Amino acid sequence: MGSFIEKIKAKLPGHDDKKDAAESTTAGPAPATTQETAPAPAPAPAAAPKTAASTGRPKILFVLTSHDRMGDTGNPTGWYLPEFAHPYNKLAPHADITIASSKGGEAPLDPSSVEMFKEDAESTRFLKEKEALWKNTEKLETFVGREGEFDAIFYVGGHGPMFDLATDGTSHSLIRSFYESNKVVSAVCHGPAALANVKLSDGSYLIAGKDVTGFTNVEEDQVGLSSAMPFLLETKLVENGGQFIKAEEPWGAKVVNSGLEGRLITGQNPNSAGPVGEAILKAIERR
């Protein structure tokens, strides 16, 4: 899968096609794993229901925004297509994935992401074939106290999380529980907005003293949406103690592993979405 930097920069004011864009190479989708089931002995007791543990597959909770409007502008927003599609396609062959959103039901897809990535085969195929994933999501509050059922939680990006998940108490509680239960906590692009204000049981910010990344102030300026945001993500992450790390150039892919055993995983922008999926898989495999 090639870099998306050229596609994104081409949409920005003042783009110069002659400038070299930074490149990032990611591996293609991982092959599906094959599970072997031993023949049941006879006679045998009734089989127990399959769980992530019993099947040997990790379980991941994907979280989408429920917010569909860009502040006072009234323009549509939501979750961002490649930031769901690419991590999902990296992880689905290896893990059981559950989809939730803050309100449950249909989670709004940012229509601008459909237009931006209409030439990306992976995103367009996901849009066509996986609609059921975001049309009937589970309500996030139903997972409170169930962190033991999962190996990781992942927050999909898009501008929506800046308006709801950044201040969602239920989401904050889940993130704290996942992290303090030694689970993988991850997010991409604007998804780290969900992590920025989370406090651990000792009262400290989750991100304090840890390397993190997310959509940068420069990138927000370049898409012309800084004034529409309730806060700037890079600024907020730094204010709450995060050590902000970013790619050498705007729109370059950047994934940061931090915290105990690298269990806090963040990605900078849409071009980082696939690599974030790969990083989540590696972190789960190390556990």
Image (cartoon, rainbow, N blue to C red):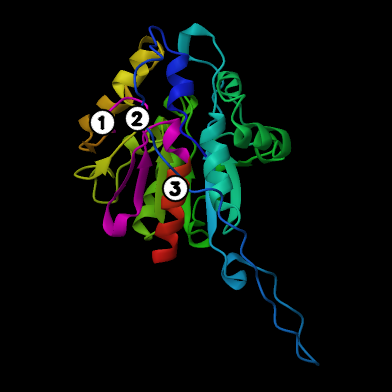
Which quarter of the picture shows residue 190? top left
Q: Position of residue 56 (x, y in %)?
A: 57, 70
In the picture, the disc for residue 174 is 3
Closest to the camera, between mark 1 and mark 3, is: 1
In the picture, the disc for residue 248 is 1
In the picture, the disc for residue 22 is 2
Q: Position of residue 68 (x, y in %)?
A: 56, 21
Vertical side of 179 occupied by 35: above or below? below
- N-terminal of the pair, mark 2 or mark 3, is 2
Vertical side of 118 occupied by 1: above or below? below
Vertical side of 116 occupied by 272: above or below? below
Is residue 105 something that shows in the picture?
A: no
Which quarter of the picture shows residue 86? top right
Name the amino acid type tagged 2: Ala
The residue positioned 72% from the left and 38% from the top of the image is 129
Q: Position of residue 281 (x, y in %)?
A: 46, 56
Q: Residue furthest right?
A: 43
